[in-house]
Amino acid sequence: MSESRIKVLLVDDHAIVLEGLRRVLELDKEIEVVGVARNGSEAISVATSLSPDVVVMDLKMPVMDGISATRELKKRLPNIRVLILTVLDDDSVEKAIGAGVSGYLQKNMAPKEIANAVHQVHQGLCPISPALTQGLITELATLKQKNKSLLLTPRESSILKLIAEGKNTTEIGDSLFISSSTVKREVGQIFDKLGVNDRPHAVSEAIRQNLI
């Protein structure tokens, strides 16, 4: 076997799936399947022994699931790449990425796409099934919007409190010794960070997030 081949460990509790994956991946002359495992615990043992470049792992397995196995593998072999291949399409993708996986595909992907994903994770990329991408993007967007308020500057926080007290632009400027134009600019930044378009909504959102 050529040393340049990508060494792959297959992990799944179904023998038919393991054999199918082996046949699919070995069609690629740059991939070498060096071993198989039937659960996460066995995967850790085999991976420690064989030091594969990439582990193609199912999520739901007896003894130890794929996410727990990935977390442990990354502790023992930090440079190992784990590609999840599963039938699930729920929020497991977020948990898997948190555990350190390098890619997440559904089992209905075409054989060529699975082989390509092995190459991608080996190169340091993170392939994710298109069917799962939109949900992940939505989740990240929600988290980004939720965390925007954490970026409020001390002066923006002061202005937000004065808005809640019913102060107008001139009164806010006088209280903080800044110009009305500066107040208007900073109010616009507050709106953007809170994801609102006017002062009443800014106040309600600030109350919801315990900012005032």
Image (tube, grey):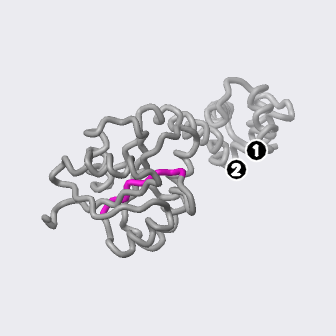
Looking at the picture, tell me which residue is in the foreground, 129 or 23.
23
User: Residue visible at 21% across and 55% down?
Assistant: 31
| Circle on res. 154 | 2
Identify the secondary structure beneath mark 2. helix
Whether the residues at callouts 1 and 2 have beta carbons within 8 Å, the answer is yes
Residue 158, numbered circle:
1
Q: Position of residue 136 (x, y in %)?
A: 52, 38
**What whole-number distance in Å separates the C-alpha atoms at marks 1 and 2?**
6 Å
Q: Is residue 58 magenta?
A: yes
Magenta-colored span? 53-60
- The residue at the far left in this view is 2
Q: From the viewer's perspective, is residue 9 above or below residue 114? A: below
Question: Does residue 74 sit above or below 11 in this rendering?
Answer: below
Residue 191 in the image: above or below residue 86: above
Counting from the top left corner in percent of width and height, residue 143 is at 60, 42
Horizontal and vertical percent position of residue 202: 74, 31
